Image: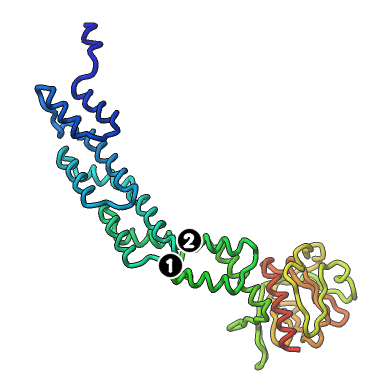
Amino acid sequence: MFKKLFSGLSPHAQLIEDIRNDNYNNWESHFENYNRTNAKKADPVKLQSVGLEIYEKYLQDVIRDYAITDGEKEVLKKIITYFQLPEAAINTIKSKYAKSALTSLSKQKLADNHLSEEELLEIGLFARELNISEDEVKRINQKNAVELYENALKDIVSDKLVTVEEQQALRQMAQQLGINIKEANIDKKLREDYYYLSLLNALDRGYLPECKPPSIVTQKDEVAYWEISSNLVFARNTSEYLQQHSNVRLRVEKGVSYKLGASRSIRIREHIVSNHPGVFAVTSKGVVFSASQQSFAIPFTQLHSFDTYADGIGLQKDKTDLLLQFYDKQMSEVVFKVLTNAINANT
């Protein structure tokens, strides 16, 4: 009894252990050695489980360089035939590594921001061996291309400044990568930050946008440059009140220049004494606030100065101070720049 308990592994179990200890290398030699030293030969079909282990290990080694040669294909076929491995089990093994390997190959080929016809063919052939559909190949390539573009976008907006040269470089990159920027699945916040900083750059160079069509009523020869939802929160007939409490006051005159960051620190909320929602607009003739109550229009000739806030704007007409708070606080910078450009272009 004790002799039986300590007699060691069975020949079959020893064969499997030897193959595993050899890291699945030389598996044929292990079978040959077994058959040479045992009266009853090993039946590979009954050892399909270890055959699948051998196939999986060899497949991992083969796809490590993201290519499967004809010789490697023959070895894989030989393993399948020798153990009569079922197709479903083979497909399950391939699916464990296929997408990860193809993604890595795609990224490798996209390192120069371009996929040539030859590279696309190479990716396609590799995918076919791993049972990856053409649609999935396109999806993976597109996802990797967008990821590259997003990384470039993050790098560009990181300094809170987008130059014309950087915009041109991004357009060229998108073209090389075959990305449709409008349809690409790019992070919404990142996309908004880029367009915002690009707009600021254009405004710094004197650009004036145009609302088509404007929501406010304009005169025949009047152009609405910018509109923003806002609240009229303060209106007082007293001079110098807002000037004492605001951040930066700019006089309305030709050549006025608003600098980025001038409105960053002070917010409006301490001045709120009323609340009239409406639309604030900058036009070629002046500024307009359109609302159900307290609407007003101030021509540039009557607008003496404006105060900059982090979340709104203060306007001075004669002895009347008007304070508007913007819903979209980030757009304060844009409004100030549009207003200064409009003043410079129309006075």
Residue at position x 23%, y 33% from top?
A: 50
Q: Is residue 52 left or right of residue 204?
A: left
Picture layout, residue 72 above or below residue 342: above
Q: Is residue 114 left or right of residue 20?
A: right
Q: Is residue 293 visible?
A: yes
Q: Quadrant of residue 177?
A: bottom left
Q: Is residue 344 left or right of residue 186?
A: right
Q: Position of residue 114 (x, y in %)?
A: 41, 66
Residue 177 numbered tag: 1
Farthest residue toward the bottom?
Answer: 220
Q: Position of residue 272 (x, y in %)?
A: 80, 65
For the N terminus, the image quarter is: top left
**Element under label 2?**
helix
How far apart marks 1 and 2 lie (CA) works out to 9 Å
Q: First in sequence: mark 1 or mark 2? A: 2
Q: Amino acid at mark 1?
A: Leu
Q: Amino acid at mark 2?
A: Leu
Q: Position of residue 186 (x, y in %)?
A: 50, 63
**Element under label 1?**
helix
Q: Position of residue 294 (x, y in %)?
A: 76, 78
Residue designated by label 2: 148
Q: Are marks 1 and 2 in contact (CB under 8 Å)?
A: yes
Q: Quadrant of residue 237?
A: bottom right
Crowding at dot 1, Cα within 10 Å, few <14 / some 14-19 / many 20+, comes out as many
Colour mapping used in the image: rainbow
Farthest residue toward the left?
Answer: 39
Picture layout, residue 309 above or below residue 49: below
Residue at position x 25%, y 11% from top?
A: 6
